[in-house]
Image (cartoon, grey):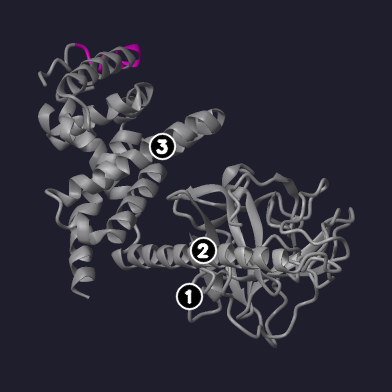
Amino acid sequence: MRDAEEFDAFYAGSSRRVLGQVYAMTGNRAEAEDAVAEAYLKAWDRWGTVREADSPEAWVRRVASRNAVSAWRKAVNRVRAHHRDAVDQEIEGLSPDHVALVHALKQIPADQRRVIVLHHLVGLSVGEIAEEVGAPTGTVKARLARGRRAMAAHLSESDEYMTGRVNHDA
Amino acid sequence: MPSNDFGRDLSALAAHGERTGHLSPAAAIRARADRRRRNRQVATGALAFLVVGGIGVGIAVNQQPRKAAPPAVTPTAPAPSVTNTPPAPLPSTPSSPPSRPPSNSTPTSTPPTSKPTSKPPRTVTGNVFAGDREVLLLPENSEATVALDGNERATLSDNFGDRALFVLNEVSGGRYWIQTARIRSGGEALCLEAGETSGAAAPVTAEGCDAAAQRQLWRFRKVGETSDGKPKYTIRTAGDYYLVQDPDGTLSGGGGTGIVAAYIGEGTPDIDTPFVLPDRGEASQPSLD
């Protein structure tokens, strides 16, 4: 019973935040919801291990990101045709600037999206990202640089959005 | 873009997702995980039983050569059908709870007439109750079909894609799982389940399959044919909750998804929905047997 209470408290304190982060990675609310729900389901399934992790929230985010990437790849392969409709439904309620941001994020590879979100949204350092995604720091830096460059290109096509804006150092 | 801060824009985007996203309560997440774990255990136990049974049968056959005929592996396994064999009329109350994984048997009590095999061959024209066909659940005279939304709720949708495809898998005695054909959660198919309610109508959601969950076990009763000769069925759980279309939200009290499980008993207005089950081809879901 104590496990359940502990898990519920963890869920209540972290799930919305993780949902927002995964949403930023996918740009699709339904996919983010599915991926996050699945990640917490797995977390409860092995709660004894997850609770002892350095950061249970990072564990859940990592699993949810993998789920989302997997769902994303399947979606791209299977329903490319009607994906545009889903995006249009998904971005209701967003400002035009954020719509452009979602579209730009969707144009870059999932690995790059993930590190961009982890760095710029979650606030992790390159070293922390490397640990979370299981890649060398050099790879993380390269993904960040390429991702920013690609996003800048996509955003500048539709707007003046990114001109000179994304030259943050990792 | 007025803002000059990429991180801030991402934060605003994430905040939008946090505000507008839907998450199940923690208790529901735990319940689903627990159900899935039980389901895995049931499947593993059944597999072990089959393996041990198969070894036993093998030993018996070796010790008793040249008997008149080998025993049927599953005594209820029928010969493969070449048409959409309708289910048998609703049997009386089930005598025991389901305790085995789904078989590929068709919903008929006809005994085997050909040589027994452990698994019937796939049919050419398709028997939608064989557990190996993808089907739609299409309300009669409706242009929309039953499909899952992003929150795994059954809805009426005009998108006849992956989220609208199901596989009917018999669990026992004419009771079927309605499993997702393409949608997976943790690599596993989900099962349509009538929600719990004290009222007349309950939502229908896709949950981890659980052979012990009565609200996931559906019966199909043939109630006639459409004008073009296709069989149509009512679909209900053991508790007389029928799968019913509710496009206006009348039964769900507004805000529904277009599909509910509605209680229909003595004196209830005639609100049942006949469904046509168009065959959409061979199922690709991994077989459990």
Residue position for label 2: B43
Residue at 16% x, 37% y is A122
Disc marking residue A70: 3
- How many angstroms separate mark 3 from mark 1 (CA)? 32 Å
Q: Is mark 3 in CB contact (under 8 Å) with mark 1? A: no
Discs 1 and 2 carry the same chain letter: yes
Query: In the image, which residues are magenta?
Result: A155-163
Residue position for label 1: B196
**Subunit of label 2:** B
Q: Nearer the viewer, mark 3 or mark 1?
A: 3
Circle nearer the N terminus (1, 2): 2
Q: Is residue A134 above or below residue B44?
A: above
Q: Nearer the viewer, residue B245 or A70?
A: A70
Q: Which image quarter holds the N terminus of chain A? A: bottom left
Identify which amino acid the numbered label 2 is placed on.
Ala
Quadrant location of residue B265? bottom right
